[in-house]
Amino acid sequence: MIDLVKQCITMSIPLVLIALAGFFSERGGVINIGLEGKTLLACFFSVAFSSKFGPIPGLALTIIATSLVSLIHWLLTQVYRMDHIISGMAINLLATGATSFFKFRFAADGLQDSAVPPKMLLYALGIIAPIALYWLSHKTKFGLQHRSAGSDPDKARLLGINPQNIRFSALVGTGVLCALAGSLLVAETPQFTDGMTSGRGYIALAALILGGWRPVNAALACLLFGAASALQIQYNGQYIPSEAWKSLPYIVTLFAIAGFLGKNRTPAGLGKP
């Protein structure tokens, strides 16, 4: 049972960080199906930078690089008004191809023990982050402006709020949290492999929807998905066929997206300029 709880936490915290990254962008009005690609790029950056510069400088450089990728997403959707879904898919496809192409040049050898990103720090941040974001969203001026930009950008403009500026800051937050999630995945398996995010970006997006675009609720939904993954790892091949265990996290995701686990109200300004 203790191993199952540990496995559940191990599987859940990366999802929490990715889901909260999605909260930053989607609650501010930017549809973000590019979470998978941003996290995959963060994994690659983490291995490449940490192996060369050490764990803390590597983590800092990973945050900067992933935030710049997230700002490209802001540029595409807010300045050039590209469709949010298409731009997110483009980031996912670019991340898959680019990381596979550059892997042998910059991340072929993985990490030494001395270069592994600070795992306990990342887990601590993942546990604190939902409460911190709840406070930021409900108790600060930025939080009110952030929710206003995602709920009704036209009314926000009448109040003197520039949704583009708010979304700029929000997507920086998305990049930071994706960087932390990618670094944590690398810390658990200190090397980069193709597609190592294994759909976590999409699962975290489903958790965000299930949590009603609220940070604490989204984190609790991530625990549900993490528990499904932990059960698959602990009991794979027992009681039911292994294929059924492997599909369990994705079945839960499909149920969440289909709305069978609860109805939620989408932010009204999501995807609007």
Image: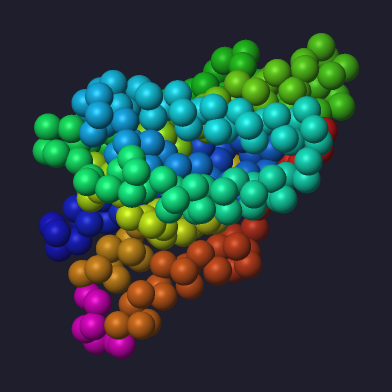
Quick one: 131 or 192, which is closer to the camera?
192
Which quadrant of the figure contains the C terminus?
A: top right
Does residue 266 appear to the left or right of 5 in the view shown?
A: right
**Residue drawn at 55 percent across, 33 percent down:** 69
Quick one: 105 or 177, which is closer to the camera?
105
Q: Which image quadrant is residue 228 in?
A: bottom left
Q: Main secondary structure of the magenta part?
A: loop
Does residue 221 appear to the left or right of 83 in the view shown?
A: left
Range of magenta residues: 235-241
Residue 220 colored in magenta in the image: no
x, y percentage for residue 6? Answer: 19, 53
x, y percentage for residue 43? Answer: 37, 43
**Residue drawn at 84 percent across, 19 percent down:** 157
x, y percentage for residue 49? Answer: 31, 30
Q: Is residue 118 above or below residue 223?
A: above
Does residue 88 appear to the left or right of 133 in the view shown?
A: right
Instruction: Decide if residue 196 is in sight here.
Output: yes
Quick one: 210 or 11, which is closer to the camera?
11
Image colouring: rainbow
x, y percentage for residue 139? Answer: 55, 18
Which quadrant of the figure contains the N terminus?
A: bottom left
Q: Is residue 185 above or below residue 62?
A: below
Q: Which image quadrant is residue 163 in?
A: top right
Q: Residue furthest front?
A: 105
Instruction: Decide if residue 9 is in sight here.
Output: no
Number of numbered discs overlaid on the protein picture: 0
**Residue drawn at 14 percent across, 39 percent down:** 112
**Residue drawn at 62 percent across, 13 percent down:** 141
Q: Is residue 97 above or below residue 81?
A: below
